[in-house]
Image (spheres, rainbow, N blue to C red):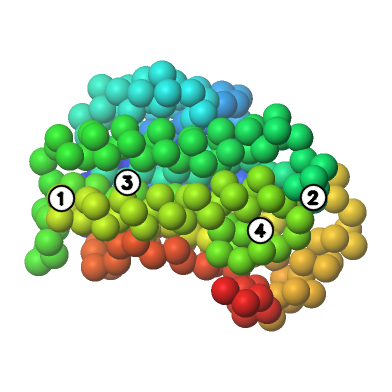
Amino acid sequence: MDPLIEAGVALVTGAGSGIGQAIAIGFAKSGCKRLFLADINLGALEETQSLIQKDTPEAKTTLFKANVSEKQSVQDMIAKCVEVYGRLDFACNNAGVGATNTKTADLSVEAFDRVNSINAQGVFLCQKYEIKQMLEQTPLIFNDHRAQKGSIINTASMNGIAVLGTLPGYNASKHAVVSMTRVDARTFAPEGIRVNCICPGFVETPMLTGSGLEDKYIEAAKAQNPSNRLMKAIEIANGVVFLAGSLASGITGIHLPIDGGGLLFHVV
C-alpha cells in the first residue's frame, strides 16, 4: 500500500458509474480510507458506496449530489468534504458528458454550451476551489519524498490530444481540460500541488455501451486500436491512483493516454 494514499482524502466527481466508479473503488482498494464521492445521480452513488463497502469495509465513504457546472454546487461540495474530513488531498475531476458526431455547421449553440459547461467549465470550477483549499492546508509528508499539499487528476480524452470523429464541441471541451491542467501544473508546482490529466481511449462503460451506438461502431473502435479491444474502466482508474500517489511525486503537467495504443494511429 502507498502510505500517501492511505493517509489522504480522495474526492471523485462522476463517481456514480463508469470510470468514476472505478476510480473510487481503485482508491479504496489501494488503501484510501476517506472517500468523498460526488455525482448528479445520488442513487448511482449509493451503488458505488455499496460496492466499496462490500470489498473494503474499512473505507469511509461520504456521498454528495453535485452539479459541477454550477459554481455554488461545486463550492458546497468542497466545503462539505473539508467539513467531514478536514482536508482534501486527491481531487479527481471526472464528471463529464459525451456527444454525437455533428459537424460544426450543424451543431446547435445549446449543444455546444451544454457539453462545455460540464466538461470544461466543470473542471475549471472544481479545480479552482480544490486549489484554494489545498493552498490553505498543511501538506502531507511521506517517506523521503517532498511534502505534497494536493494532487489533482482531471479526466480528458484521446479527443483532447487528437481529432477523432466529428465532435467539435466535445473535442473543444477536452482540449480545454488538457490546457487547464498544464497551466495550473506550472502555476502551482511551487506550492506543492501537482496537476495532471488522463486521456482515456474507448472505454467499456455505460456511456459507450449504452449510448445507442451500433455494435459495428464499437467494433470499429476496437479495429482502430493496436490492442484490438476497448479499455476497461479499472485500467483508467489505475492510472489515476498512480498519478495521485507517491510513486508519481515528480510528475506534474502531463496528459497521460490510457488507450491501448490508440493514439499511435493518429498524428498528435
Mark 2 or 1, closer to the camera: 2
The local crowd at label 4, few if under 14, some if 14 to 19, many if 20 or more residues have their Cα within 10 Å, is many
Q: CA distance from mark 2 to mark 1?
A: 42 Å
- Where residue 78 appears, as percent x and y from the top left, is 33, 28
Marks 1 and 3 in Cβ contact (< 8 Å): no
Q: Which mark is residue 203?
A: 4
What is the quadrant of residue 110 in the picture? top right
Q: Residue 18: image x %, image y %?
A: 61, 46
The first of marks 3 and 4 along the sequence is 3
Residue at numbered disc 1:
191
Q: Which residue is mark 3?
A: 90
Element carrying mark 4: loop
Q: Quadrant of the N terminus?
A: bottom left
How dense is the environment of label 2, judged by Cα within 10 Å: few (below 14), some, or many (20 and up)? few
Q: Earlier in the sequence, mark 1 or mark 4?
A: 1
Distance, label 3 to label 2, CA atoms, is 37 Å
